[in-house]
Amino acid sequence: IIKKTRFPHWRETLELELDAEELSDEGTVIVEVWDWDMVGKNDFLGKVEIPFACMHKTPLLKGWFRLLPLGNNEADAGGKLGALRLKVRLVEDRILPSMYYQPLIELLVESVISPAEVEDSSSLTMLEEVTTVESRQDVAMTLVKIYLGQGLVVPFLDYLNTREVNHTTDPNTLFRSNSLASKAMEQFMKAVGMLYLHEVLKPIINRIFDERKYIELDPCKIDLNHTRRISFKSGVSEAEVRDYSVEMLQSYLTSIIESIVNSVDQCPSVMRVAFKQLHKRVEEQFTEPENEDVKYLAISGFFFLRFFAPAILTPKLFQLRDQHADTRTSRTLLLLAKALQSVGNLGLQLGHGKEQWMAPLHPIILHSVTSVKDFLDKMIDIDHDIVSSVPQRAVFMPSVTVKEGYLHKHKAEGPQLLSRFAFKKRYFWLTSETLSYAKTSDWQVRTSIPIQRVCAVERVDENAFQQQNVMQVITQDNDGKLNTMYIQCKNVNELNQWLSAIRKASIYNERMLPSFHPGVHRSGKWTCCLQAGRAVTGCSRTHSAVTLGDWSDPLDPDVETQMIYKQLLQGRDKLRKKYLEMEDVDQTSTNKEKRINPDIHPDGAECNTQPIKPSTSVAARLLVVIEDLEQAHATFQLREKEDATRVILNP
């Protein structure tokens, strides 16, 4: 809901996961616009319909779409309903069984654990060569997940960072480009440091949103009509507005800097070790006395400029707030983000830019340089071996509230009520150890479910309760009995977030179910499959991850490796031309035919499990792996094995 405007900008990403049978050409994505009324019924304003048949032909659609009335006849509306700007993307992937991706995983692992020389070509360097600028962030995020899953994220980052440092001659340009190394570090911080960032920034961000002060330093943008909160006087001068703004910004900035420099113990160990390695590589490369600060700038460039400053600028994208900031608060956040960037640059560029009106904040920025350097020294003062004793995939820290908020819990006990009365509003808390709920957030008595008892977290069909956005949490007690709790979320985004968070917290549970019922057991049978027994085996496969395509996903190695394969497949011709143009193609094909294992996988695809000879060049081995995966995909597609298919829709 966007209030007080006839020209709303939602800036929302809605992500829908569909099964293969739901993606028929007859299916449609429908986006409806309503006028929200506090009292009375909401008014229908129009809708946009996008048929799947159209999306199968054009997977990416973006632009202005005319709103249609309920009857779908644009002529009836006369074009007067307005238009909606949308970008809709369809991603349809076939995910093979894990064994097919193992050769590619082995090549990626080999790149970082046993590189002959850091300058030699490897599967990682070849992947970077064929990665486009547009896809670099997605590739970096996927690689971080793969190496997190392998427990090798620190060697992976060290490998990329060492190459980047060695190829940089001017320290002023170090990590300033959007290289794979820069993007990987950026995604790594988001993957392992989000709870840390929330703990450090959320109190001050909430304060800024709650106070909603009018703050402006640029003389060209000061609007005296917005100064009523500053003074009750009849008129306020520009100088008074500026002085008040400086005072408030200094207060906010001081709180932010103090919160960051006092957070050494809160920073995840794996992040500290990664920065320690980066500090070491930069110090070895730039030994001149005039480059003394480069080792600090390399770390602060990531820590402040690519992590904390973007989170301050757009808190919603880092889940610090549920809604985007209004215009007034956005301006305050922008000024603070600019100031924090100067802190990250250790004040070296102050006074050289065009924004001289930021000068009143320069003293506090310069005063913070010493404490920032001291903080960075303390952060990298950590034993490298400590990472091996901490599970890198366990992103959630004990006793930290991962997610909380009001949801509607289904009342399963007692007589069956109408669906609209069967859900009761409850406040939920999720930690790495428990899922708890109570009547309100300050209620003294809570009901808690140990996370280790969670067996599955899945969506529920809409027709089960005639309600949207319902999920189920299936748990198993000490006697082995399964219990199901149904929970309704307010929208699809909240549903995805709760699904992802609970699945992520329970990702290491040993008693996860392979199947579940997307319906409910009513009148002696399941609404989904019509089977009678309440304890009968589920009719649908459970999911190990929410396909959100961002850092909040649990790890799903098969999906991640499939993404890397697709990127390599697009650049296969480029790799072949660069690395194998002088080799005998016929001999390579003959060797490949001899190497293939004729064993047939039960699902019908040929399964190659023979090791590739180490003497073969990395490029040749990589191209063979790409061809093997391409052949496996073709075989599965030919035999139409639906159980090996996952379809992902990302609007």
Image: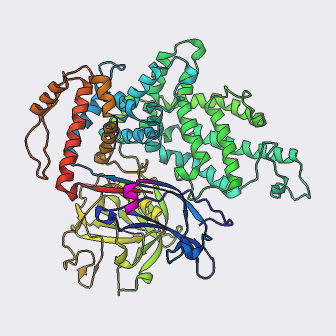
Q: Residue at x 45, y 55 (%)?
A: 402
Residue 227 sits in quarter: bottom right
Magenta span dominant secondary structure: helix
Q: Residue at x 70, y 48 (%)?
A: 332
Image position of 67 with respect to 141: above or below: below
Q: Which residues make up the magenta segment?
A: 52-60
Q: Nearer the viewer, residue 79 or 308?
A: 79
Q: Is residue 44 left or right of residue 641?
A: right
Q: Residue at x 78, y 43 (%)?
A: 217
Residue 54 inside the magenta-drawn segment: yes
Quadrant in which the C terminus appears: bottom left
Residue 481 in sight: yes
Quadrant in which the N terminus appears: bottom right
Q: Residue furthest top?
A: 288
Q: Is residue 143 left or right of residue 521?
A: right
Residue 366 sits in quarter: top right
Q: Position of residue 275 (x, y in %)?
A: 47, 30
Q: Is residue 325 left or right of residue 307?
A: right
Q: Position of residue 388 (x, y in %)?
A: 33, 35
Q: Position of residue 434 (x, y in %)?
A: 38, 60
Q: Nearer the viewer, residue 33 or 259?
A: 33
Residue 268 in sight: no
Residue 75 inside the magenta-drawn segment: no
